[in-house]
Image (tube, rainbow, N blue to C red):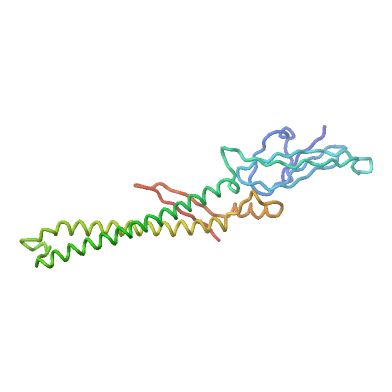
Amino acid sequence: EGTTLFLDGQERSTHLLGKAIPVDPGARRISVTAPGFLPFTQHINLLSQERRTLSIQLVPKLADGRAQTTPDREPDRATHPGSVPSRGSSLKPWVLLAEGTLSLGGLVLGVIEVSELAQSTRNRDRLLDEITSGNGNCLASSQMPHPACGRLADANANLDLLYTLSTVGFVSAGVGAAALVTTWIFWNDSAAATGAAKATANRALQAPIQVGVTRVPGGAVGGISGTF
């Protein structure tokens, strides 16, 4: 009788005790009072999608206001539902893996296409030598174009394709490496943070940093944005 529940200084219904209470992430203050007991107050820092279970023990007080006993308070338990993992402890390794894969895959693609580009360039040069040594040409106005002109056109088109693919590969490798370094430095792992470090990690997670992939016609575009 007379028990009162406060969340961030605002009185809430005691029917919420023992039930899940949805709150915004960040610093929260929970207080419980009851006649004949010392007030209970605890501060916590919640991450996005984090669940926290608090064990509240009210200590009876004597007539002079002192506590009869001071039982050990059970530590609050933080849980992370499997359906919605915590950003700090679960998503970061997967994001790092994806960015590393993008960087490595882009580098491999760029190296392979550069090798193919060199081979195709040599083939194109041999066709040019063949055409010029036979006093031939591939001009549109020529009545008798050299027989190798068709192969030369194909070789030039292949060179353009290989150049584009090598550029895409190296650009992807650079973007992936930059995103990997940015995530490693600026995305704090909140699972290892305690006390003041938890508050710092919480603020970092709430910073306007976004990593995402957007579908576009013919593929997808990935990017990272934020203010550092």
As drawn, which residue projects farthest toward the right?
64
Quarter of the rendering containing residue 39 = top right
Task: State how many labels appear.
Answer: 0
User: Where in the figure is residue 130, as x and y percent of width and height?
Assistant: 14, 64
Quarter of the rendering containing residue 59 = top right
Comparing 49 with 27, the one in front is 49
Comparing 6 with 216, the one in front is 216
Is 11 rendered above or below residue 160? above
User: Where in the figure is residue 73, as x and y percent of width and height?
Assistant: 80, 41
User: Where in the figure is residue 41, as x and y percent of width and height?
Assistant: 78, 45
Residue pictured at 35% horizontal, 56% vertical: 112
Left or right of residue 145, residue 37 in this image: right
Is 27 rendered above or below residue 157? above
Quarter of the rendering containing residue 151 = bottom left
User: Where in the figure is residue 171, as x and y percent of width and height?
Assistant: 40, 59
Left or right of residue 29, residue 119 in this image: left
Left or right of residue 9, residue 96 in this image: left
Q: Where, quadrant-wise, is the C terminus in this rendering?
A: bottom right
Q: Where, quadrant-wise, is the N terminus in this rendering?
A: top right
